[in-house]
Amino acid sequence: SFFYFVNDFKSYFIKYIPWIVNFWFVGLLIFSFRFIGGLLYIRRLRTRFINKPDQFVESILNKLLVSAGIKKSVRVFESALVKVPVAIGYFKPIILFPLGLILGLPQNQLEAIIAHEVAHIKRYDFIVNIIQTIAETIFFYHPSAWWISAVVRFEREKCCDDIAVKLCGNSLTYSKALLNIQQMKEQESSFVLAAGGNQN
């Protein structure tokens, strides 16, 4: 019966709980190192192999910051270490573009891509992503945690897409910008995912 099944499961769990705890602890250590390594890599991105782009890029950024109602200082750089545009940092956020991408996009498409990264800053996604990664580290053993995390990341990108379209005022321009980025990346490597972590 169900009552006996519950009792058997409880006794089995109690018997092997030391092994279960050890497994969880080892997994926690592994994913903690992964998390710390990610933070160290982000710190490296902020300081290594970056280049300040032309002034017109900062003027586009400043205009979008005003439109988005963001008062904190945000800087933009070209980086030799990133393959897609990214926004990192909370107190002093920066936007990084892959080398050559800024010159490879028309100005209106560049504005649309910057708008997407500004949306991440507006939504505090850097902090949210850290909290989410901590949750993944603690509940690494549970498939539901990874599924929920994937859904949250997907929806986060959709929200930023909506904000970007609102800021740049043209969904067609934004779509073309994403398509151009995808084509540039496919020329560079067939193994690189699409901008924003969404291959579609």
Image: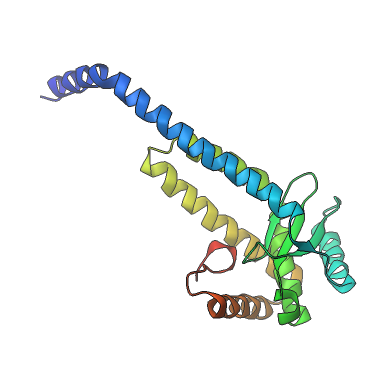
Spot the residue most to the front: 49
Residue 123, visible in the rendered structure: no
Q: Residue at x 48, y 75 (%)?
A: 190
Residue 39 % position (x, y): 63, 44
Q: Nearer the viewer, residue 117 or 31?
A: 31
Judging depth in this view, the residue of 13 and 98 nearest the camera is 98
Residue 131 location (% of width, % of height): 59, 39
Residue 84 visible in image: yes
Left or right: 87 in relation to 194: right
Task: Judge from the rendering whether residue 24 lies leftward or rightward of residue 130; answer left or right.
Answer: left
In this view, the residue farthest toward the left is: 1
Q: How is the image coloured?
A: rainbow
**The one of 20 and 144 positioned closer to us in this rendering:** 20
Q: Nearer the viewer, residue 82 or 140?
A: 82
Q: Quadrant of the N terminus?
A: top left
Q: How many marks?
A: 0
Above/below status of 128 relative to 116:
above
For residue 134, above or below residue 172: above
Task: Write the residue at 39% across / 43% down.
Answer: 144
Quadrant in the rendering for residue 113 = bottom right
**Figure check: 6 above or below 120:** above
Relative image position of residue 72 (x, y in whole percent): 85, 50
| Residue 116 location, quadrant | bottom right
Residue 7 point in image, percent of width and height:
18, 18
Q: Is residue 5 left or right of residue 102?
A: left
Residue found 86% across the figure and 51% down from its top: 71
Q: Residue at x 56, y 77 (%)?
A: 188
Q: Locate residue 170 relative to residue 146 in the image: left or right.
A: right
